[in-house]
Amino acid sequence: MNTKNEIVQNSLRCLQHPATWLSIVLLLVNDHILKVVWPSWITGKLSDFVGLFFFPFILAAGLSFLLSKYQVPSIRVGQIAFGSVGIWFFLLKTFPSVNYLTTGFVSLLIGFPAKFVMDPTDLVALFAMVPAWMIWRQSSPIKPTSAAYAALLFGSLAVIATSPRDSTVASVTNLEYYQDGIVYAAEFPSWGNIFASVVKSIDGGETWDEASDVFSIEIKSLPLQHCGRLNAWTCYRLTKNGKLLELGPERKWKNVGDVSTKGYDMILFDWNDREYVIVAAGEHGILRRELPDGEWKVIPILLADKPIENE
């Protein structure tokens, strides 16, 4: 076998390896199913592990075709491919400038805003390249088949299809209060929106930004009811249909006249010797009120900024 054929066929042989197909399937299942029903740091890391396992094979295949007319040994092509992927991943997770350039390039490539989280702990996924390198170095008499070209196609599409969309909240459905004025809000993930993110406020809900320390919020079911700690006589209830009720002076529940939109979640907390109630208002953002007699404020959150029309 001449050098030209050796380079190309070794790339294709690695692509049709069962472990390559398994990693491609795992990437698709993880990003399109597991991250929806079970968002966690495990599903986040899994994408990095399986992606780093098979992506060097895809890059090596591309280099094999480009360099096939040159006398470049197969081992050298592998070193270039694996080294390039490893260095890029390291820089992506640790250097803001590389992260920014990669985000811009991928966004242009896939046609929607992308976002790559800078998290040095993700570098542990580089270990996935070790068994991949062993497969690349392994000599085998197996000839490439159509499965190799199918893996090249599906692997490339899997990487593009699971490129992380710039996480934005377009409808606030989940809320959580931590402490010291720290509030989290999120959009309930769905099959049509698996890239919803968690946002964070450090001033009790006045201003919001993307959260990097929390990846999911517990989904609570309605009805909900909360009473104040500092204002024990103040109680709110969200009905099963999302209607906001307030406990009146006569100790009977009544509609909150200032709120005409549906509520999805509610928290009541005290911070800096004051007490607040926040209601998740879907596409409008949140409704926030300082107790006991403050005005209701509509606060947009990222793309959840639709004005509330007065009825």
Image: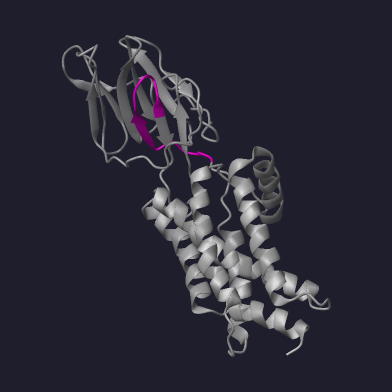
Question: At 23% across and 28% down in the image, what residue appears?
Answer: 225
Q: Position of residue 96 (x, y in %)?
A: 65, 38
Residue 227 in which image quadrant = top left
Q: Which residues are magenta?
A: 168-183
Q: Is residue 157 visible?
A: no
Which quadrant of the figure contains the N terminus? bottom right
User: Toward the viewer: 145 or 238?
Assistant: 145
User: Toward the viewer: 231 or 241?
Assistant: 231
Image vertical order of residue 227 relative to residue 36, above or below: above
Q: Residue furthest left?
A: 251
**Left or right, 43 with reference to 97:** left
Image vertical order of residue 251 relative to residue 102, above or below: above
Q: Main secondary structure of the magenta part?
A: loop
Q: Is residue 253 visible?
A: yes
Asked if residue 171 lies in the magenta stretch, the reply is: yes
Q: Position of residue 107 (x, y in %)?
A: 67, 49
Which quadrant of the figure contains the C terminus? top left
